[in-house]
Image (cartoon, coloured by chain):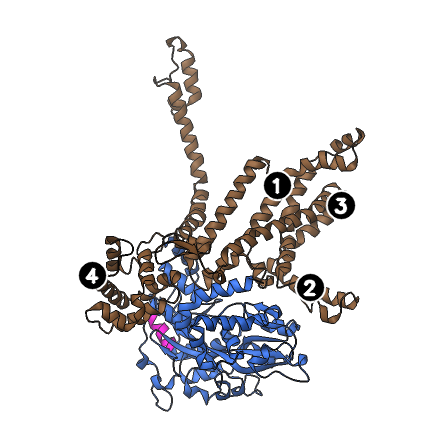
Chain colours: A brown, B blue
């Protein structure tokens, strides 16, 4: 610091002699408090510059992509951007207005322009999301209007396909003429709008998402409970065994943890399938007959077994780190004061493991809720989770808006759980390692 | 809206900096990619000096869609399914292809007549036909072997688990064929609610005996492990297992589901001229016939069919393993991209709902 006036220590030294003026100032007469704040601000700015790359990294690779993906769940301009004239007509008229001559003219003009620009597929896809079976109406009409179309347009379009007169189609187009829509969220909870715009449940045979959300949370809870039951004694052993033996045990916990997820999943397939190792042993021992081999994989059981195994270390490690710090003399004291071993465990030992248990349960549950590859491989039909639907919409149906809506609901549900956890247990009590 | 995708594709884009002497081809990987490298790429590079970079994807339509969405296209030629080709063409993502510019057959037949019906689309040219067929393990049925699609649903006479893919497109048709619907009426029946109900009712009869598969390699594995006694499978994969790995499998061609793979060029491809040159070369009579030496998929040109000879082992005649050979086409269902563009989403939801209910 070449400039003494900006050096806070120098400033204090100067003003110490000027106390009688009643106000602390620096050598050049500025108030001390302000000078101090300024120099601290500079230090803070420098510190901020240090973390700036990390911040930019998180912003670019995490916040922005997730934000953009979530935006798709309520914003889809596939129709409105490519059909401007008929969208304008919808904006001018009330819901339920039957299409007049102006509407038909606008529709014909938009269809022609969109077919020329080869965006008609985008338009059809958008409408097909809400009204199944209408995509080809747009693409085939597009092919015909490119060859030319004569007024009156209402008759001309209905001659190409009578579906153009369907009020449900017009109602769906009206919905799509505004890019901001809640329809993807409605679809994600098995709801849709009818021709009058009322929200109602989809037919029972089409309902799938609500049930899958329920199943995802239920299975995640079961898996969390199982990892607790299995992991707690192991973590306790790890924490209390002599160093050499606990190290060996630790390696047995960590080795699978470091093994590829796919390898572990496929080895469960080898073990559990009907012609697999477990069934072979059971048949060899004569416990079951050759004809009654157990179905332990390609169903919910397979998903639970494989995921419990894969997520087990996430429960054991936080528990272990907490248990190691628990002083054994507390339990000894309780015992010496007459507590049974069960009471000592229940009232002294177990409460001290809660921070580790909370962290482990949170980790396992949140990971399980978003699990995708394991249920896809070993889940069969009954072991599928909501993440498999999200993947399907991302890669097969290419309905990214729907995938985003499903993912947003999942994210919101996890945040609510996190908030509940904070209220009940307190996030400060989390101990991850 | 699009910056993320731009960023992510920019990262992959770094992998190949384009020069005029290269063409990036995105295909499906595995044995199929190898057949394309041998039959198309090597002679193409020899003739033109243009280097071909092969990039593998689970379904090349997915990266193509992402690249178009991001406005940063890095692949020049994509090998995709018909339904994807038609959809992306309708969405304006693909270059239109002048069919008259494609090379004629050796005997002078113009390309427009040489290609099998449906193999030429506005923006796409088919290279192969492939079938989804039923295959069974011969060791499981030593006394009486199944022969028809109906036998697939008859678990009394032909016991054992069944393998089926976990999607409506390649399951509903099979149920209808087994229920007695003629192959050319499948889509008429599936267009009605009663028809869909009928297909699901037929599937209900074996629901508890089905092991569902997703990736193309799975059914072969399930069959080899003895986990299922019969499964549907892509014909090239099962051929590979039967001939290259000597597995005791047999194929039932009744009710095979035919699909095409097509070459497309996206708009804004980095090397459009080289891409078009590659496309024309690869869909020529000789390269298409050569490809059948490495994998049992049928060439899309009539003039290639006669040139198909032996498998690369030199002893296996390829013709009886081709999905396009006349006796296999008798009860074959052709893929209908228009139907699936309209109804895939709806039927997939109903299918998932059906799967989940017990």
> Do pointers 4 and 3 mark residues of a single chain?
yes
The spot of residue A39 in percent (x, y) is 41, 26
The residue carrying mark 4 is A102
The chain identifier of the residue carrying mark 2 reads A
Question: Given this view, does label 2 or label 4 mark the residue nearer the observer?
Answer: 4
C-alpha separation, residue under disc 2 versus residue under disc 1: 32 Å
The chain identifier of the residue carrying mark 1 reads A
The residue carrying mark 3 is A244
> Do pointers 2 and 4 mark residues of a single chain?
yes
Give the camera-side residue of A284 and A313. A284
The spot of residue A338 in percent (x, y) is 80, 30
The chain identifier of the residue carrying mark 3 reads A
Find numbered disc 1 in the image and state the secondary structure of the residue it sits on: helix
Q: Is residue B130 above or below residue A222?
A: below
User: Do callouts 2 and 3 mark residues in contact (Cβ within 8 Å)?
Assistant: no
Work out whether mark 1 precedes mark 4 in sequence or the reverse, and give the earlier one. Answer: 4
Find numbered disc 4 in the image and state the secondary structure of the residue it sits on: helix
Q: Residues within 10 Å of mark 1 (few under 14, many from 20)?
A: many
The residue carrying mark 2 is A271
Work out whether mark 2 precedes mark 3 in sequence or the reverse, and give the earlier one. Answer: 3
Residue placed at 26% from the left, 66% from the top? A111
Give residue B318's mark: none
Give the camera-side residue of A191 and A402. A191
Work out whether mark 2 precedes mark 1 in sequence or the reverse, and give the earlier one. Answer: 2
The residue carrying mark 1 is A358
* B192 drawn magenta: no
Q: Residues within 10 Å of mark 4 (few under 14, many from 20)?
A: some
User: Do callouts 4 and 3 mark residues in contact (Cβ within 8 Å)?
Assistant: no
């Amino acid at each position: 610091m070449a400039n003494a006036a900006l050096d806070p220590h120098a400033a204090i030294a100067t003003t110490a002699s000027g106390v009688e003026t009643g106000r602390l100032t620096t050598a050049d007469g500025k108030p001390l408090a302000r000078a101090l704040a300024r120099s601290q601000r500079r230090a803070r700015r420098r510190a901020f510059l240090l973390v700036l790359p990390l911040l930019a990294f998180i912003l670019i690779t995490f916040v922005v992509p997730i934000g953009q993906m979530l935006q798709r769940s309520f914003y889809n301009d596939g129709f409105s951007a490519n059909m401007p004239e008929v969208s304008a007509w919808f904006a001018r008229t009330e819901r339920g207005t039957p299409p007049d001559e102006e509407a038909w003219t606008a529709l014909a003009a938009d269809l022609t322009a969109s077919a020329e620009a080869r965006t008609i597929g985008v338009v059809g896809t958008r409408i097909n999301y809400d009204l199944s079976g209408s995509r080809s109406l747009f693409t085939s009409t597009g092919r015909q209007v490119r060859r030319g179309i004569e007024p009156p347009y209402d008759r001309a379009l209905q001659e190409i396909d009578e579906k153009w007169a369907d009020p449900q189609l017009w109602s769906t187009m009206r919905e799509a003429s505004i890019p901001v829509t809640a329809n993807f969220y409605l679809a994600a909870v098995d709801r849709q709008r009818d021709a009058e715009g009322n929200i109602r449940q989809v037919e029972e045979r089409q309902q799938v998402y609500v049930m899958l959300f329920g199943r995802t949370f239920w299975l995640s809870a079961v898996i969390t409970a199982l990892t607790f039951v299995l992991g707690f004694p192991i973590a306790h052993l790890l924490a209390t065994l002599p160093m050499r033996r606990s190290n060996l045990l630790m390696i047995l916990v960590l080795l699978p943890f470091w093994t590829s997820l796919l390898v572990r999943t496929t080895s469960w397939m080898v073990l559990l399938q009907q012609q697999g190792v477990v069934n072979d042993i059971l048949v060899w021992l004569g416990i079951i007959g050759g004809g009654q081999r157990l179905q332990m994989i390609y169903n919910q059981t397979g998903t639970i077994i494989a995921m419990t195994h894969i997520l087990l270390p996430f429960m054991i490690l936080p528990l272990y780190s907490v248990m190691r710090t628990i002083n054994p003399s507390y339990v000894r004291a309780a015992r010496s004061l007459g507590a049974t071993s069960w009471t000592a465990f229940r009232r002294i030992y177990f409460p001290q493991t809660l921070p580790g248990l909370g962290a482990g349960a949170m980790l396992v549950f949140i990971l399980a809720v978003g699990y995708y590859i394991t249920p896809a491989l070993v889940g069969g039909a009954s072991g599928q989770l909501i993440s498999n639907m999200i993947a399907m919409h991302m890669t097969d149906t290419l309905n990214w808006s729907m995938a985003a809506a499903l993912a947003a609901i999942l994210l919101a549900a996890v945040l609510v759980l996190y908030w509940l956890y904070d209220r009940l247990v307190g996030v400060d009590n989390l101990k991850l390692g | 809206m699009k910056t993320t995708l731009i960023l992510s594709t920019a990262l992959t884009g770094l992998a190949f900096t384009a020069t005029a002497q290269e063409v990036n081809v995105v295909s499906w990987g595995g044995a199929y990619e190898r057949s394309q490298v041998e039959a198309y790429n090597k002679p193409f590079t020899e003739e033109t000096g243009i280097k071909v970079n092969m990039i593998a994807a689970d379904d090349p339509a997915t990266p193509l869609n992402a690249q178009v969405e991001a406005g940063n296209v890095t692949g020049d030629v994509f090998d995709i399914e018909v339904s994807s080709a038609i959809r992306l063409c309708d969405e304006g993502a693909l270059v239109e292809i002048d069919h008259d510019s494609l090379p004629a057959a050796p005997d002078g037949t113009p390309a427009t007549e040489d290609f099998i019906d449906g193999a030429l689309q506005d923006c796409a040219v088919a290279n192969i036909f492939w079938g989804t067929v039923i295959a069974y393990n011969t060791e499981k049925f030593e006394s009486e072997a199944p022969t028809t699609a109906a036998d697939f649903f008859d678990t009394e006479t032909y016991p054992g688990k069944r393998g089926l893919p976990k999607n409506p497109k390649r399951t509903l048709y099979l149920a209808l064929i087994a229920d007695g619907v003629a192959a050319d009426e499948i889509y008429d029946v599936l267009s009605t609610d009663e028809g869909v109900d009928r297909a699901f009712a037929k599937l209900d009869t074996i629901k508890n005996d089905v092991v569902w598969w997703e990736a193309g390699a799975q059914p072969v594995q399930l069959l080899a492990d003895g986990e299922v006694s019969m499964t549907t499978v892509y014909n090239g994969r099962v051929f590979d297992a039967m001939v290259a790995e000597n597995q005791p499998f047999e194929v039932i061609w009744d009710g095979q589901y035919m699909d095409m793979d097509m070459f497309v060029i996206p708009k804004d491809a980095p090397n459009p001229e080289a891409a078009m040159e590659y496309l024309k070369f690869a869909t020529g009579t000789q390269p298409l016939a050569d490809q059948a030496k490495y994998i049992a998929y049928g060439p899309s040109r009539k003039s290639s069919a006669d040139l198909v000879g032996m498998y690369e082992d030199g002893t296996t005649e390829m013709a009886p393993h081709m999905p396009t050979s006349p006796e296999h086409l008798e009860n074959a269902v052709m893929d209908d991209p228009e139907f699936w563009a309209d109804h895939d989403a709806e039927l997939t939801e109903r299918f998932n709902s059906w799967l989940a209910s017990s």
